[in-house]
Image: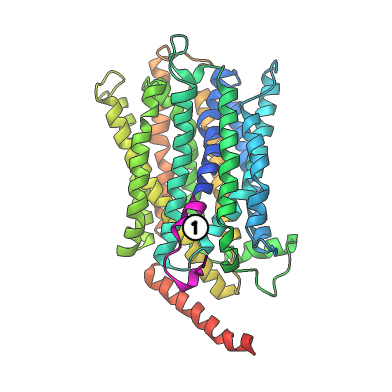
Amino acid sequence: MTHTAPGEAERLPLRTKLAFGIGSAAESIALYSVSAFGLLFYNQVLGVPAHLAGLAISASLFLDALSDPIVGSWSDRTRSKLGRRHPYMYAAPIPIALSVYAIFNPPVGMDQTGLLIWFAVSVIMLRQAMTFFHTPHLALGAELSTHYIERSKVMAYNSFFAWAGAAFTTTLALRIFFPSTPEFPRGVLNPEPWSVFAMSLAIATLLILFASAWFTRDRIPFLPPPAKDETGFSPAAFIKDVGRALTNINYVWLLVAYFFLALMLGLRESLRMYTNTFYWGLNSEQLSLFIIGSFLGYAAAFVIAPRLHGRTDKRRTIIVACLIYALVPPIPLVLGLMGVLGPGDPFLLPILIAFAGIGYLTVSILQISVMSALADIADENELKHGVRQEGVLYSTRALAAKLDQAIGAALGGFVITAIQFPIKATPGEVAPTVLNKLAFADGVLAAIPGLIAVGFYAQYRINRAKFDETRAALNARKAAAAPALAE
């Protein structure tokens, strides 16, 4: 088999993009299980107060955020026969799978305090282990190509498979493990299937993560190594790496914007299952149909995003996608608060699925665009500092996102408590005033940080012309260095 180095062709092999993409599917299976079902499981099934369960999720995100840049810097400076990224991608899957299983399998007989501690510790373990796969994996994706559009295609695979992992988790939960029954019309409130559900997720995560690492190993010879004068990882080197990254003003704008975007995402994710189950009164089978909207949204983004980057540029795409994502998906909740739309409406489910599809489309385009833009920023930093910092760039962004998602998760728990949402509630028996407060938080309040993010994304300044200028300077530098190396 012959291999083509990324710099020699605009297109990467399909096999490589698929192998890279499936890694994000496994990440979603593990992490989405917690964000979508963790708070509901511990609050509504086990009886842990919502604000305390939300704080447990927030603590895991906060500690994970702090470890992300460390792993990124460590990965950037790693020298091994397996390159800079793969040693971590091989080591992470087993502890990740064990943590997923532990989260939904607390020991029998624990009181609320014990359950809360178990939840916090197991989620912290999951996120710490996932950092050792997620950060090197994203950095690997940025390194696979130097081409403006091909980078977007790589990140389109990342985004689509991230959807696939979340869709797999949702379908498995709502169609296989938690169907509606006479005893539990809302199947997710059934305490029995959670253990087998978690085992299935753990096995799937383990196998897919290993597959992603294994089937991308052939690209190792073509990936950039650490600079020859770069030392190994140390606290001083870590501080130096982060300082380099933060000197890039375009990177800072993306960080600040994503901070506000992640706040919106964290709050919406914490409240979505409550809203769909209690406000709209949807059962498991109806909830599973949202996969239609999500598939159409992510599939369309997979095709559309790289084309948008070719016809306009990543900056404009980011701004418009963020604006639409903040304002359009919550429209059904606003209509519900106005009395225009309600649980008895015969067109309710198609309307909700359609607006969810728009949300999935725009958030996927936004993710693809920002992830691709970070690779362009890595070019700027290489030109300025002489080193590539994909690990630090992606991980420091993840730090900002997770700190903010931690706030969002905590806010979600506090919203549930503040509006006096009952523990172990029965759908159809929650007071209308409580449900309206829930809808207002998910539909109106959560959109505000998204609109703030639009303003900061507008400050980002790398367009296609700027990218071409940077790549030309890098290529000229490499061409000038080649004779010296040959001598």
Name the amino acid type tagged 1: Thr
Is residue 420 visible from the viewing direction of this image?
no
Q: Is residue 191 above or below residue 371?
A: above
Q: Where is residue 394 in the image (x, y as percent from the top left)?
A: 55, 56
Outermost residue, top direction? Answer: 183
Q: Where is residue 371 in the image (x, y as percent from the top left)?
A: 47, 56
Q: Is disc 1 placed on a helix, strand or loop? A: helix
Q: In this view, does 409 lie above or below 11?
A: above
**On the image, which quarter does residue 227 sit in?**
bottom right
81 vs 281, left or right, is right
Residue at image location 43% in from the left, 16% down from the top: 180
Residue at image location 66% in from the left, 35% down from the top: 98
Total numbered circles: 1
- Seen from the viewer's position, the closer of residues 447 and 306 is 306
Q: Is residue 355 above or below residue 319?
A: above
- Identify the image's colour scheme: rainbow, by chain, secondary structure or one colour: rainbow
For mark 1, what is the residue? 16
Q: Is residue 395 above or below residue 340?
A: below
Is residue 6 a member of the stretch shown in magenta? yes
- Seen from the viewer's position, the closer of residues 82 and 150 is 82
**On the image, which quarter does residue 100 sit in?**
top right
Is residue 330 a member of the stretch shown in magenta? no
Q: In which quarter of the image is the C terminus?
A: bottom right
367 vs 234, left or right, is left
Residues shaded magenta: 1-21
Q: Position of residue 423 (x, y in %)?
A: 54, 16
- Seen from the viewer's position, the closer of residues 427 and 148 is 148
Q: Position of residue 139 (x, y in %)?
A: 56, 58
Residue at image location 24% in from the left, 25% down from the top: 347
Callout 1 environment at 10 Å: few (<14), some (14 to 19), or many (20+)? some
Is residue 304 visible from the viewing direction of this image?
yes
